[in-house]
Image (cartoon, rainbow, N blue to C red):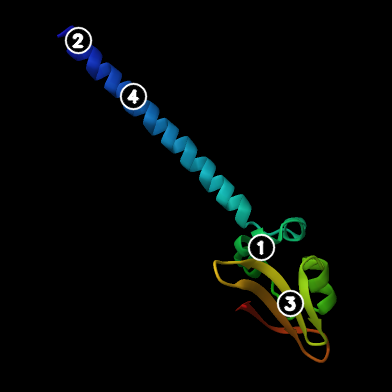
Amino acid sequence: MRNKKMLIFCVTISVLVVAVCTIVITAQIQKNNYERNVFSTERWNENVMQRTYMIDDLLSRYEIIGMSRDEILDLLGTNALTRIFPDVLMYRVGRDFLHIIQFMIHFDENDIAYQYSIMYD
């Protein structure tokens, strides 16, 4: 009888330890994913390959359409700016298995953004 109680106690403690560890690890993963996804100008310019995680946050927090070229350059900088045309800025965002991912911003004759797109080269 005593061995059975000890076994039940050990199994209960083991299950609790596993549950607590799972919760802690899951919380840490969620925190890391959240931080990786948050856009900031500094992070955008520091690590080009992390931009794929930040692009959704960037587009949800900033109204790119209607911003001037200078405002966009202030926001996104010039790091990994792959092409500059009179009417287009193109930023390298990252890559997937087969493609380089580019973020294109189109400007009108007054240098105001009127369209953006994500392109896979």
Q: Earlier in the sequence, mark 3 or mark 1?
A: 1
Answer whether labels 2 and 1 touch (C-beta < 8 Å): no
Residue 75: % across, % down: 78, 67
Disc sitting over residue 14 in the figure: 4
Instruction: Give residue 120's position: percent from left, percent from top.
Output: 60, 77
Q: Amino acid at mark 4?
A: Ser
> For residue 3, which numbered disc appears in the image?
2
Classify residue 104 as left or right of residue 111. Answer: left
Q: Quadrant of residue 64?
A: bottom right
- Disc 3 and disc 1 in contact, CB within 8 angstroms: no
Single out the residue that lies furthest toward the left. 1
**Cα–Cα gap, marks 4 and 1:** 41 Å
Label 3 belongs to which residue? 90
Q: Earlier in the sequence, mark 4 or mark 1?
A: 4
Spatial separation of the CA atoms under disc 2 and disc 1: 57 Å
Badge 1 element: helix
Residue at the spot x=18%, y=14% of the render? 4
Crowding at label 2, few (<14), some or many (≥20) Cα neighbours within 10 Å? few
Tally of marks? 4
Quarter occupied by the N terminus: top left
Q: Earlier in the sequence, mark 2 or mark 3?
A: 2
Q: Position of residue 41 (x, y in %)?
A: 76, 60
Which image quadrant is residue 51 in? bottom right
Q: Residue at x 29, y 18 (%)?
A: 10
Residue 65 in view of the camera: no
Tag 2: amino acid: Asn
Question: Is 115 drawn above or below residue 7 in the view shown?
Answer: below
Q: Amino acid at mark 1?
A: Arg
Which callout, 3 or 4, points at the residue further toward the start of the chain?
Answer: 4
* Residue that carries the numbered disc 1 in the rendered image: 51
